[in-house]
Image (cartoon, rainbow, N blue to C red):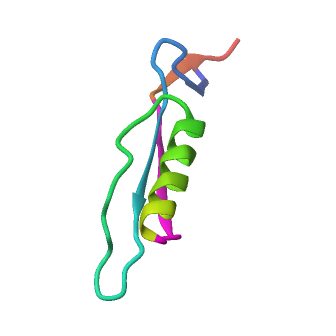
Amino acid sequence: MPYTIVQDPTAEPEYEARCVSGDESDCAASSGPYGNPADVEEWQRKHTQETRHTRYRRSFADYAVLAPQG
């Protein structure tokens, strides 16, 4: 039976950013997980204002389910 992979509508996705700025090593400050990417962007803006750091690694995580086709 063929399946389609879809985002699980019963689980909220998570967005997060980690600061990777730094001369000798990464700052490593992290936003922590949020349910909305706008909250992570706001954390990045504030961190940049406080530190002048401008490089971030962003992560997105969700849950997927396989749904039968047809």
In the rendered image, residue 57 lying in the magenta stretch gets the answer yes
How far from the left and from the top, in percent, is residue 43?
A: 48, 47
Q: Nearer the viewer, residue 1 or 5?
A: 5
Q: Is residue 8 above or below residue 16?
A: above
How far from the left and from the top, in percent, is residue 25?
A: 28, 81
Q: Which residues are magenta?
A: 52-62
Image quadrant for the N terminus?
top right
Residue depicted at 51% across the width and 70% down the height:
55
Q: Nearer the viewer, residue 30 or 48?
A: 48
Image quadrant for the C terminus?
top right
How far from the left and from the top, in percent, is residue 18?
A: 39, 58
Q: Is residue 11 above or below residue 42?
A: above
Snapshot quadrant of residue 9: top right
Snapshot quadrant of residue 34: top left
How far from the left and from the top, in percent, is residue 12?
A: 48, 22
Snapshot quadrant of residue 5: top right
Q: Is residue 59 above or below residue 69?
A: below
Q: Nearer the viewer, residue 18 or 43?
A: 43
Residue depicted at 56% across the width and 17% down the height:
67
Residue depicted at 52% across the width and 23% down the height:
66
